Amino acid sequence: MHHLIKLIFIVVVGSMLGSCGATTPAIGTVIPVTPIIQVDDRLLSLDDDLYHLASIGVMIAGTPSEQQSMLGVIPRVWKPSVSTIAVTNTLILGVFTSVRGTNGYEVTIDAVGLDDTVVTVQVIYTTPKPDQLLQPAGPRASFAVVGVDRRLLPAATNLTVRVVDQTNTEIASQTYQMP
């Protein structure tokens, strides 16, 4: 009986120690992406689509018409970066902040993960600090765009694309029907 108790104790402690440090990231398996655009909050934007965002929005382009819609939001200077991407091979993911009248709101894509049919885009979303001096200015927005090789994605009909911030709080989500 004494040996059985020792064995159970060893199995329980061993399984607890074995799971330490072996947690799966909240975003799933990290997949490689190709950075396309990163624009800080100095972007002066008057695009009406960005005014309707609560704080962060996501755009997905997997067809030529969706790519054209994304180009409608991106300022002219960055359009060539997106227009040259072959959407037959690459799924384009864009994360945008809403338009603000001051600086201090920025988004960058930190990692992209895949878990079954869920693509999670982990971003670093910064907002002004309470004591930060904000510069009143015309409408400003920040955005980041990356490309994901379609061969890395599941052959599913629908993908859920989630955007989480650096604390793994979901701040946007969209179901995307794969073409």
Image (tube, grey):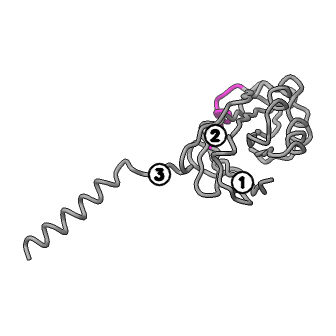
Any mark on residue 123, and which? 2
Residue lying farthest to the bottom in this orientation? 1
Disc 1 residue crowd, few under 14, some 14–19, many 20+, Cα 10 Å: some
Q: What residue range appears in magenta?
A: 122-133
Any mark on residue 173, and which? 1
Q: Quadrant of the N terminus?
A: bottom left
- Vertical relation: 143 (above or below) 164: above
Disc 3 residue crowd, few under 14, some 14–19, many 20+, Cα 10 Å: few
Find the distance from the CA under tag 1 to the CA under tag 2.
13 Å
Residue lying farthest to the left in this orientation? 2
Disc 2 residue type? Answer: Val
Q: Earlier in the sequence, mark 2 or mark 3?
A: 3
Q: Earlier in the sequence, mark 3 or mark 1?
A: 3
Residue at the spot 91% in from the left edge and 33% down from the top edge: 46
Residue contact between numbered discs 1 and 2, judged by CB atoms under 8 Å: no
Viewer-side label of 2, 3: 3
Q: Position of residue 59 (x, y in %)?
A: 79, 45
Disc 1 residue type? Answer: Ser
